[in-house]
Image: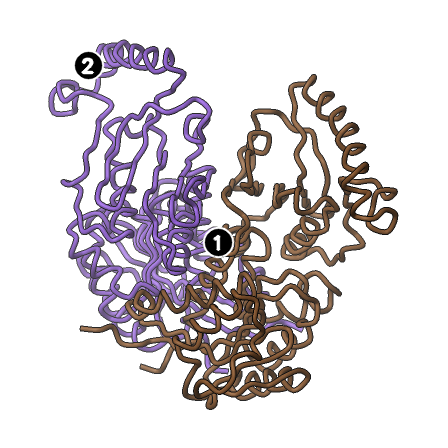
Chain colours: A purple, B brown
Amino acid sequence: MPTAVKSVLPVVLLGCGGVGRYLLRHIVSCRPLHANQGVAIRVVGVADSSSLLVADDVNSSGLDDALLTHLCAAKSAGSPLSSLLGQGNYQLFRNPEARSKVIDAATMLGRTTGLVLVDCSATYDTVNLMKDAVGHGCCIVLANKKPLTGAYEDFQKLVSNFRQIRFESTVGAGLPVIASVTRIVASGDPISRIVGSLSDPRDDLGGMDVARKALILARLLGQQISMDNINVESLYPSELGPDAVSTEDFLESGLEQLDRSMEERVKAASSRGNVLRYVCEIGSKRCQVGLKELPKDSVLGRLRGSDNVVEIYSRCYKSSPLVIQGAGAGNDTTAAGVLADIMDLQDLFQKPA
Amino acid sequence: MPTAVKSVLPVVLLGCGGVGRYLLRHIVSCRPLHANQGVAIRVVGVADSSSLLVADDVNSSGLDDALLTHLCAAKSAGSPLSSLLGQGNYQLFRNPEARSKVIDAATMLGRTTGLVLVDCSATYDTVNLMKDAVGHGCCIVLANKKPLTGAYEDFQKLVSNFRQIRFESTVGAGLPVIASVTRIVASGDPISRIVGSLSDPRDDLGGMDVARKALILARLLGQQISMDNINVESLYPSELGPDAVSTEDFLESGLEQLDRSMEERVKAASSRGNVLRYVCEIGSKRCQVGLKELPKDSVLGRLRGSDNVVEIYSRCYKSSPLVIQGAGAGNDTTAAGVLADIMDLQDLFQKPA
């Protein structure tokens, strides 16, 4: 006997490049699994940076799976959404109209069936849309760090109904970091410190990506701070920064310079039985990001490859922290984290029995 | 401005010894925190092995915090619940009447306000009560492994409405193991293997406690198996088991015998650069518990002290697993895990706006 559908989640997706595209694929391939759990995800709209594809009647139907699959293939080949024309029961809107159509859907669905607005873009530009959606009673799920790392007031508005927001993938891709912090906090176990290696430094020599993750964790722990308040140690000096030298010059001579000074620091640490790790550290009143000398055989010291690791210290995890470790990047893994977040909202979308 | 109460969760607690007593303390001390989140936990009944204390009117009120605190102190001093007589707006029932009064509450509240039946006991005897509660639409939260590790049909009934059951504390105390497995499964990322060190072998030389945890994980991954199907390596041979020698003889001469044979295995492993760890291993079609020789510098090989560790392998965590590590026992930590589970059910208890 097929399981009755208990929850229908209408979704509008902002950003259908890497992570968003994988998310759509996961949603389509998980249909039988989710049906088994009594859940149906209805993708009513998908936007890229210039256009929005939206179902003709967002109240009763979504974009069909054939279209979503076709859309993924088009984006994968580098085509914009607007290349998909006249192929089904949907409409295409271009900016700036596209944005107002998203608000229309949020307004209409937010107070009736509910709506999950999912941000898999990588821009600050979605923040007002996300805030509007929250104002209309919508749920939001973010893989995009930027709306949560701008003005503190924006963060506050976005998390104002904490049960209606999920943002696991902003910190550790699919790693259950936010979920664990939320569980620990809900159980009245006060978190005193979080230490993490949350990025592959090769992609983030300036440390800004890690700093954003650190800021999200710090704000989650109640710190009312902004990026300006975080002490970020860049892996290059300002005289080698993008404002001072060209990328070519940086790669040609700058990197060599960096390597020499880094080699000395590594040697010095090694002579003390330590290694260097680029970590973020969030206490009750501070938040910093930079290189730290750590014992070779500590959890962070032993870290290899592209794994992320987070240590959480609290009353229950005092002498020995709660450690979460694993792949913390990649489109597939990040999209899986976003989908888990969407599924975690299903109790808010239960159909009356 | 105080936060409006959005969710009221009526709770009946079975078992108020170690974990249950800590849970009641946590619930009382977390009142301001939970009020801030718009959540109120209403403890309408508490049972120990012989009696039930229940609020006069379970529909509208719970046992007050002064009584709960008094109850914790009494249990801590070794007194039974029945020693608390005539001190407030509650009634005391003894077995077997106590059991039927729990069913009464479950029947009455299950279909109206809802009820969370929490099992912090350590007995098989609660399984029928828990199944009845599920039948009446109640939510259940378990720290007690036994109802989930008996007949497969019982497990199936208990998890039949998967959104209404939580059992994090049965496997890793407060560690987010079940929550992580559930997230990964919901995201369509198939789990191929779980390997874990889930107990302090000093408390569990026979391996049955670890086997129960392994069984819960295996059933969660879809294996329709029972304890009989698990290959459990005991740390003592049957000729030193409780049926063959007395505890005194075991401690006097048996332990020494064990130590000698173990020393040889440890040495042999060490000569290969390995260490022995008592682990459970769950694949797609198997489940075993026993000593395993592992590389010294693997996550499990490096494990020290009383930490638990779980490695989860899936499509997203293939070459390098998702690792969760930390304290996996203790009344405080286990009770925190139970409270996090209760809080995680809050969306099912939302008051109409």
Give how far across and how far down residue A68 sits, in percent: 43, 55
Give how far across and how far down residue A171 sits, in percent: 35, 44
List the residue tagged with mark 1.
B333
The amino acid at mark 1 is: Thr
Q: Is residue B314 above or below residue A104?
A: above
Check disc 2: other Cα within 10 Å, few if <14, some if 14-19, many if 20+: few
Report which quarter residue B261 is drawn in.
top right
Measuring 76% from the left and 24% from the top, which residue is drawn there? B264
- Which of B202/A310 is in front? B202
Q: Is residue B216 left or right of residue B319?
A: right
Measuring 67% from the left and 45% from the top, which residue is drawn there? B282
Measuring 54% from the left and 53% from the top, which residue is drawn there? B173
Give how far across and how far down residue B115 sits, in percent: 50, 78
Q: Are marks 1 and 2 on the same chain?
A: no
Q: Is residue A184 left or right of residue B169?
A: left
In the rendered structure, are the residues bearing label 1 and label 2 in contact, judged by CB atoms less than 8 Å apart?
A: no
The amino acid at mark 2 is: Asp
Secondary structure of the residue carrying tag 2 is helix
- Which of B162/A97 is in front? B162
In the rendered image, the quadrant that contains the N terminus of chain B is bottom left
Report which quarter residue B63 is drawn in.
bottom left
Could one spot residue A257 in this view of the protein?
yes
